[in-house]
Image: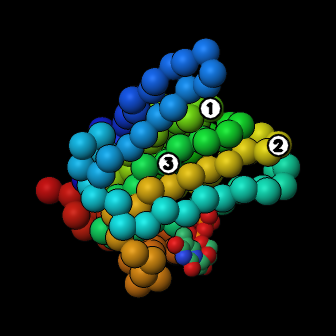
């Protein structure tokens, strides 16, 4: 698992003078079945979210409204993705440390997740994350 697997997925978009429509089907448009949806909103200016990794979880992160940046770190290198469009999703593979920063006022971050919530899947200590991430390198 590495940063090269993480990427922006352009989602289907039906454009219409009366408004646009985007839809997402698990395993069709994203590489996993959707078992959970959550969203983050009302983030105060200057606040950050994330600051953890997941051992198994796969996610798709979408800026439903407004904008924010997602910094991904696989323990070797980092990449910043600017999220500002409801038809672009960031696929985040397992074993990726993530920081969500630079939230605009009114931003809504929707996350599609491959598993139900499981605190045991979290890596909340960066040093521990590095040990496990580097241990998986071949
Ligand atoms: P967390 O994933 O740490 O938030 P973020 O990545 O946005 O900083 O989640 C914050 C808390 O919310 C977590 O300690 C428990 C709760 N939570 C759930 O109960 N279910 C969920 O699906 C999620 C994502 C969080």
Q: Could you tell me if residue 61 is visible in this image?
A: yes
Q: Which mark, residue 123? A: none
Q: Establish whether ligand 1 lies closer than 8 Å to the Cβ of label 3.
A: no
Q: Which badge, 2 or 1, is on the more N-terminal residue?
A: 1
Residue 40, quarter of the rendered image: bottom right
> In the depicted view, which residue is nearer to us: 23 or 27?
23
Label 3, on which residue? 61
Q: Secondary structure at mark 3?
A: strand
Label 1, on which residue? 84
C-alpha distance separating marks 2 and 1? 12 Å
Q: Is residue 100 above or below residue 12?
A: below
Label 2, on which residue? 105
Q: Ligand 1, what quadrant?
A: bottom right
C-alpha distance separating marks 3 and 2? 18 Å
Q: Mark 1 Cα within 10 Å, few/some/many (few <14, many 20+)?
A: some
Q: Is residue 25 above or below residue 118?
A: above
Give how far across and how far down residue 29 sits, in percent.
30, 40
Query: In the drawing, does residue 34 fall left or right of residue 73?
Result: left
Count of marks placed on residues: 3
Q: Secondary structure at mark 2?
A: loop
- Of all residues, the one furthest to the bottom in this rendering is 120
Q: Residue at x 62, y 50 (%)?
A: 109
């Amino acid at each position: 698992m590495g940063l090269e697997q993480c990427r922006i997925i352009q989602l289907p978009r039906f454009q219409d003078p009366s408004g646009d429509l985007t839809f997402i089907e698990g395993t069709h448009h994203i590489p996993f079945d959707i078992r959970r949806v959550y969203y983050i909103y009302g983030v105060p200016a200057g606040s950050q979210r994330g600051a953890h990794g997941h051992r198994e979880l796969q996610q798709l992160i979408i800026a439903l409204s407004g904008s924010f940046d997602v910094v991904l770190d696989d323990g070797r290198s980092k990449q910043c993705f600017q999220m500002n469009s409801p038809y672009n999703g960031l696929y985040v593979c397992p074993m990726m440390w993530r920081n969500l920063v630079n939230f605009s006022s009114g931003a809504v971050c929707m996350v599609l997740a491959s598993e139900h919530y499981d605190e045991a899947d979290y890596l909340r200590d960066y040093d521990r994350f590095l040990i496990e991430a580097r241990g998986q390198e071949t």
